[in-house]
Image (tube, grey):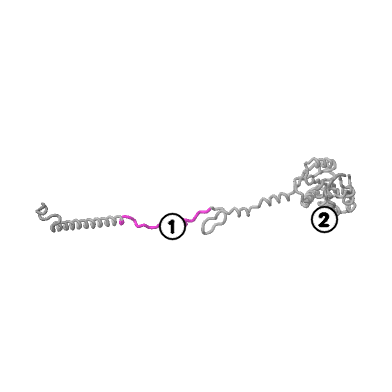
Amino acid sequence: PSPCSSRGGGEGTPMTKKRTRAASARIQDGGDQDREGDGEEDRATAGRYIRKSKPATIPRKQEGQGVRKRKANGRAGDEHGPPRKAKKSEAKRAQPTQRTTKKASKLAGPELFHSGQPLEHAKCVFVLAHGATAKSGSDRMQMLKGTLDPLGHVIMYDTSGTSIGARTETHRRVAQQAMEHDRPVILAGYSMGCRSGTGAANALVAEHGGGKVVGLLHFAYPLVPPFKTSCNDRTTPLIELPSGLPVLFCSGTRDGFLGDGRGQAREEVLGAVVANMKAKASVKW
């Protein structure tokens, strides 16, 4: 027999099993008590910390807090805050556009260039208009100005575009300014300036009975454009001029704007128009 069995049993004996179960029971009871103690200690510790901490509260918003601030310029404000900045489109509508400014400057009239005799000593005032392309500073216009300077006071101006309506209105307004100097006014022009002078004379006659306009001076009147047989819109204003108004045509025998396209002499073309005019017209070739 083994030593264990001589002392009262070994592993496999009933006594050994009984002792093993008793030891296991004691160990288990001690472990449960330890766990229960640990749990009570944990609960006590947690309670102590909970009592020491303050209750969590959500602070109330102050009055006016959280409202987005707005700038003080722009529209009038409301109950939600200060006024906001005006939109760019609103500011654009409030200000005058650049187009209005340009239109106002055009209505003020073109810049005038004075030459010749002083106004206080001049016998008459020439309002000289340039053609479709050559401005008042061109050689041709300076030559014509030099011809008129010894005869009176000369007023020239620059304009642009080929609209005869706009050019006629400009010529008329410059003539009205010249009439304020209490001197006889002669409307002169070269090529397209002749047409604007004729239209301005008819307009002034309709408004003021002619006023102080005493004559017309046409250098190279463009009666018929090249490659055309007739042009009524250029002859009708000449025929409508009032009777008794002197008109002088200074034209060249090789002028391309006096031919009718059928080989007819330029003298005959211009002569036929002059014969139908009520005004006192003459031609200088």
Q: Where is residue 112 in the image (x, y as percent from the top left)?
A: 76, 45
Is the residue 134 above or below the residue 53 in the image? above
Is the residue 31 above or below the residue 153 in the image? below
Looking at the rendering, in which quadrant would you find the C terminus? Answer: top right
Label whose residue precedes the other's in the sequence (2 or 1) = 1
Whether residue 257 appears in this view of the structure is yes
Image point 35% across, 57% down: which residue? 55
Q: Where is residue 162 in the image (x, y as percent from the top left)?
A: 77, 49
Q: Is 5 on the left or on the right of 233, as rendered?
A: left
Question: Which residues are the magenta region?
Answer: 50-70
Disc 1 target residue: 61
Q: Is 48 on the left or on the right of 285, as rendered?
A: left
Amino acid type of the residue tagged 2 in the rendering:
Ala
Q: What element carries label 1?
A: loop
Q: What element carries label 2?
A: helix
Q: Say whether marks 2 and 1 touch (CB < 8 Å).
A: no
Q: Is 66 on the left or on the right of 10, as rendered?
A: right
Disc 2 target residue: 206
How packed mark 2 is, by other alpha carbons closer than 10 Å (few <14, some 14-19, many 20 or more), is few
Q: Is 243 on the left or on the right of 159, as rendered?
A: right
Q: Where is residue 43 in the image (x, y as percent from the top left)?
A: 27, 57
